Amino acid sequence: MSYTNVQIANLALAKVGDEGGQITSFTQDSKEANLVNKFYEPSLREVLRMHTWNCATASTEMTQDTSTPTFWDYQFSLPADCIRPLQLFRSSSSQRYVREKVEWRVEGRKVLTNFEQVWLLYVKYLTDPNQMDELFIRALYTQLAIKLAYPLTEDSQLVGLLEDEMHNVILPEARRVNSFEGYVLPSVDSEWLEATMTTSSASNSYPPFAQSSYGTLPY
C-alpha cells in the first residue's frame, strides 16, 4: 500500500484518538493541521536518526575538501542528504570497496579521517512515503502521535504509552526485520591481527595474515 504525508499524519491523529480532526492538507485552517505542520518534519528527522533503516540507507564515494583539518590528514563534507553517517570505508583505485576499520570523526558537517579515498555509508533524508517501508511508516506516525498527544488531549499517560510502544515494540521489531535484509561477512576486530598485517620493508616479507582482508563492502 502506498501512503501520502497527509495519510501518515491522519494515522498519527487517529492514534491519539482524534478521528474527528482528520486533515486534508498540512496548511488547512485547523488546530490539528497546524500541529501536524509544526511537528511532522522534526518527527521525520528523529525517526531517521533512531535506526539504520534499510529503506533510507545510501552510500557514496566522498570528495575531499581542499582545506586540511588540524588533527587529521583529510576532510570531507557530508552529503547534503545525510541525516546520520554510519560507517567509513577505505577505498583505492584497485580496491574501491575494501571493508576495513577506518578511524574517523564527524565535526559539524565534516568527516575527518587519515585516509585520502573513502566511501561513506549513511542514512539519507527520506521524504517520499513510497520509498518508506511499513515499519518506518509505523514508527513515523507513532513518533508524530507522541508529539501531538499532549497538545490535543493533555493526557500525559497517553504520551507515556505511545513512547513505550515506540521504543519497546516498534523499534525492536524494525531492528529484527532489518537484520534479515542482507548479510555482511563478519569483520575481525583484533589489535593482534592488525599488528600482523604490517609489512617488513627490510626483508620485504609478509607476516601471517598480511594478505588477508576484513571482508568486503556489499554496497
Image (cartoon, rainbow, N blue to C red):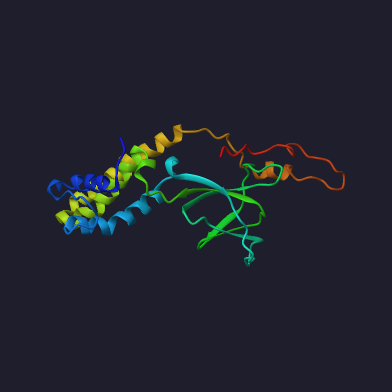
**Would you identify the image quadrant in which residue 15 lies?**
top left
Which residue, as the protein is rendered here, is positioned at the far right? Answer: 203
Which residue, as the protein is rendered here, is positioned at the far left? Answer: 20
Q: Position of residue 94 (x, y in %)?
A: 71, 42
Q: Which residue is found at the position 64% from the left and 39% from the top?
A: 214
Nearer to us in this view, 107 or 187: 107
Nearer to us in this view, 174 or 134: 134
Q: Position of residue 107 (x, y in %)?
A: 53, 62
80 left or right of 22?
right
Q: Quadrant of the C terminus?
A: top right
Q: Position of residue 28 (x, y in %)?
A: 20, 57
Nearer to us in this view, 167 or 94: 94
**Would you identify the image quadrant in which residue 114 lies?**
bottom right
87 w.r.t. 169: above or below: below
**Would you identify the image quadrant in which residue 195 lies?**
top right
Q: Which residue is found at the position 31% from the left and 38% from the top?
A: 2
Q: How many marks?
A: 0
169 left or right of 99?
left
Q: Position of residue 90 (x, y in %)?
A: 64, 48
Q: Quadrant of the N terminus?
A: top left
